[in-house]
Image (spheres, rainbow, N blue to C red):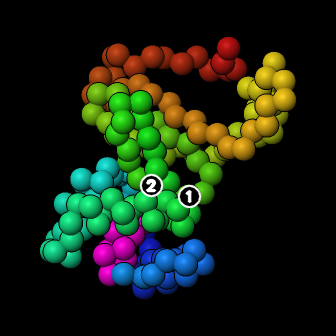
Amino acid sequence: MNTSPDAANARLRKALEETGQRFTEQRAAVYRFLSGTTTHPNADEVFRMVRAEVPGISLATVYKSLETLVNCGLAKKLTYSDGSARYDARVDPHHHARCVSCGLVLDIPGQMGENQLRNFTKGLDGFSVLGYRLELTGFCGSCSPHQALKVPAGPMN
């Protein structure tokens, strides 16, 4: 989602104002970095990169800025069962594929249709879907192409 710094700042300013938050240079630096990368960084990675632009920024400020971006709808927090989290400034409907070896997270375009969602909720009487998150896990091509599960074409059971 590469955008110009001015466009990123304007988008951030608008989202912060709509949620009663104030615009700060630290938040802007975090958002500019996040919106300019496709790597789905964790907070430590954001901190290391943003520190080059804002030398006095603390890790706590980066964490708070990331949570503010999530709460404003400008980023998504991808959480995992091991307690780790990665951040994504791409908020349009899409899925992810994550390498269990190196942690690489890749975007998969698209979203499930209503019929597909209905198939997942069959037998869940009264369950109302508010949202969903689809993540494929496996090995990226660099880690172990021979270990990756070969998924046959066609519908999955």
User: What type is the residue that disc 1 sits on?
Assistant: Val
Residue pointed to by mark 2: 88
Residue 34 covered by magenta stretch: yes
- Tag 1 near tag 2, CB within 8 Å: yes
User: Can the viewer see residue 122 in this picture?
Assistant: no
In the rendered view, would you say 30 is above or below 128? below
Residue 131 covered by magenta stretch: no
Residue 127's x, y, as percent?
79, 31
Q: Which mark is residue 123?
A: none
- At label 2, counting other C-alpha atoms closer than 10 Å, the crowd grade (few under 14, some 14-19, many 20 or more) is many
Of helix, strand and loop, which one carries label 1? loop
Residue pointed to by mark 1: 91
Cα distance, mark 1 to mark 2? 7 Å
* Bounds of the magenta segment: 25-36
User: What type is the residue that disc 2 sits on?
Assistant: Asp
Magenta segment, prevailing SS (helix, strand or loop): helix
Of 131 and 153, nearer the camera is: 131
Residue 139's x, y, as percent?
36, 26
Of 89 and 20, nearer the camera is: 20
Residue 103's x, y, as percent?
32, 36
